[in-house]
Image (tube, grey):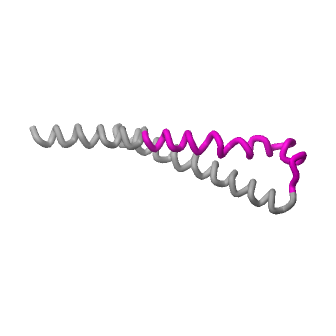
Amino acid sequence: MKNRLERVLAYMVAAVILVSLASFVALIAATGAGLGREEFATGIWPVVTIMPLIGLPIGFVLIIALLVVSAVRRGRAAKDAGN
């Protein structure tokens, strides 16, 4: 059960950061292809534009949560091993 929480957090971190980085690369490629400000305001581009601004901080918070959960589990395991 404890490992399941860590695994879920790890997959969430990977997914959020990968989607954010893919959006960032898409923005760079679209800008390089010549899309202007008007094209970025229509279709799916507003979501692609906002995704790195939201996803990367969420990924950072999830990494911190994963570190805390892992440290608590290791602390409990060390305490149990000492008894």
Judged by its main secondary structure, the magenta piece is helix
**Is 27 covered by the magenta stretch?**
no
Left or right of 7, for residue 26:
right
In the rendered view, would you say 28 is above or below 61? below
Q: Nearer the viewer, residue 69 or 25?
A: 25
**Is 41 covered by the magenta stretch?**
yes
Q: Where, by quadrant of the figure, is residue 32 drawn?
A: bottom right
Q: Where, by quadrant of the figure, is residue 43 drawn?
A: top right
User: In x, y percent, where is residue 57?
Assistant: 56, 41
Left or right of 58, for residue 70:
left
Q: Residue at coordinates 65% horizontally, 42% vertically from top-left? A: 53
Q: Residue at coordinates 46% horizontally, 44% vertically from top-left? A: 63
User: In x, y percent, where is residue 11?
Assistant: 50, 47
Image quarter (top left, top right, bottom left or bottom right) of the C terminus: top left
What is the tally of numbered marks visible in this picture?
Answer: 0
User: In x, y percent, where is residue 44?
Assistant: 80, 44
Left or right of 57, for residue 79:
left
Left or right of 69, for residue 51:
right
Residues in magenta? Answer: 35-64
Q: Residue at coordinates 36% horizontally, 43% vertically from top-left? A: 3
Q: Nearer the viewer, residue 65 or 81?
A: 65
Q: Nearer the viewer, residue 73 or 54?
A: 54
> Residue placed farthest to the left in the image?
83
> Residue placed farthest to the front in the image?
37
